[in-house]
Amino acid sequence: MEKTKKIYNKFQSILLSVSQWIGSLTDTQLLMTITIFIFFAMYLVAMATLGGGFLHAQQVFDMLNDNASLIIVSCGLTIVMIGGGIDISVGAVTSLVVMSCVLYLNNGGSLVGSILLALGIGLAFGLVHGFLISYLEIQPFIVTLAGMFFARGMTTILSVNPQKAAHEGLAKLRDTKIVIPWLGYVAKNGNLVPARVEIGVVVALLCLIVVFILLRYLRLGRNFYAMGGNQQSALMLGINVKRTRFLSYLISGLLSGISGYVFMMHTGAGNATNAAGMEMNAIASSIIGGTLLTGGVGNVAGTFFGTMTLTTIKKIVVASGLNDPWWQSITTGGMLCFFILLQSVVLGKRAKKKAL
């Protein structure tokens, strides 16, 4: 009886410590922690029940290889959403960058020139969007919707048919892989298959780190949070809201340009339907990662795990034998609704506790 009481008291002590730790977290940290926990729990369940590729580290690397461009775009969108805005043109801009760079390279262009072209296109869209939204005060949804249609139209004008990049330098860049032998696995024929990571993943992680530092440690990052949390309060604090909002869209446009180039390195081809729906996946990744549509709350680390969670559930659906594309759409929609509901409940309860 006494031993049981000790165990019970110990358990209560642990619960109290966990509760105090959770209470010390900010809303951003709490939502990010929930996302990370769900991702690891989901992946561990997949390893235990489905096995197969989930037991190999290459599965995670393949997820990163396939979604490097999405991670980059989601970082830019997270900045915009933290500031209380939205940008639904990022997928179309990515597609335009891919087609433009492929055609440029096929017509004798250089790799350096193609990189500058990608960055230029992204910055041009960010510049126009930022100016119209920040200084002319037009609704972000309308402006970026127009940008999406314009970018899609321009992509189709460049070429209706798929275009494969026939540039030797790009081919070498695409085929370059970072090999990690100790994370490989032994195939059925007995050969060691090393883990491989594409260059695009390195670019994506570098963008993630830079944006994380920007939001966490730099004044501009704090201004994004202040603007998204309460614009009037931000103005009273002396923050130039118009310039801050303009910079959020400029950064988003720049990251869309980088995303397009990474996408091209991964596929080696341009198509009018490239990156179709990427903007919706980026928004979903940001929300799952703990970014609120109302602004003021979010973190790119959470967005990264949001992207990985979204990809994992799609992999689980396919591994379960549900290969029809609509099943992935259904599960994505279900997860999005679940996380929005979870955010509402968690933050609602927190607000009530603080009010008491």
Image: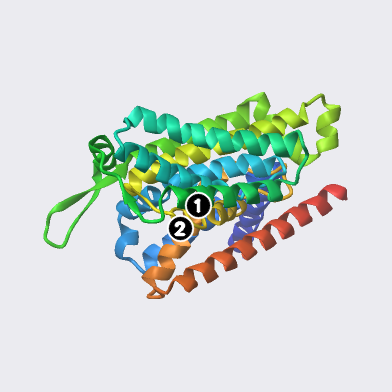
Residue 113, percent from left and from top:
38, 29
Residue 108, percent from left and from top:
29, 34
Side of 207 relative to 146 (left or right): left
- Identity of the residue drawn at 60% across and 36% down: 126
- Give above or below for 356 relative to 253: below
Residue 166, percent from left and from top:
25, 43
Residue 273, percent from left and from top:
44, 57
Color scheme of the displayed model: rainbow
Residue 242 seen anywhere in this rendered image of the structure: yes
How many other residues sit within 10 Å of disc 2, few (<14), some (14-19) or many (≥20)?
many
Disc 1 + disc 2, Cβ < 8 Å: yes
- Identity of the residue drawn at 24% across and 49% down: 184
Q: Nearer the viewer, residue 340 or 323?
A: 323
Say which residue label 1 marks. Answer: 307
**Secondary structure under badge 1?**
helix
Q: Amino acid at mark 1?
A: Thr
- Identity of the residue drawn at 34% across and 55% down: 59
Q: Amino acid at mark 2?
A: Thr
Q: Nearer the viewer, residue 275 or 333?
A: 275
How many other residues sit within 10 Å of disc 1, few (<14), some (14-19) or many (≥20)?
many
How many marks on residues?
Answer: 2
Which picture quadrant has residue 28? top right
- Identity of the residue drawn at 30% across and 56% down: 56
**Secondary structure under badge 2?**
helix
Residue 209 seen anywhere in this rendered image of the structure: no
Image quadrant occupied by the N terminus: bottom right
- Give above or below for 257 relative to 57: above
Side of 141 relative to 109 (left or right): right
For the residues labelled 1 and 2, the Cα–Cα distance comes to: 6 Å
Side of 112 relative to 24 (left or right): left
Say which residue label 2 marks. Answer: 311
- Give above or below for 293 relative to 82: below
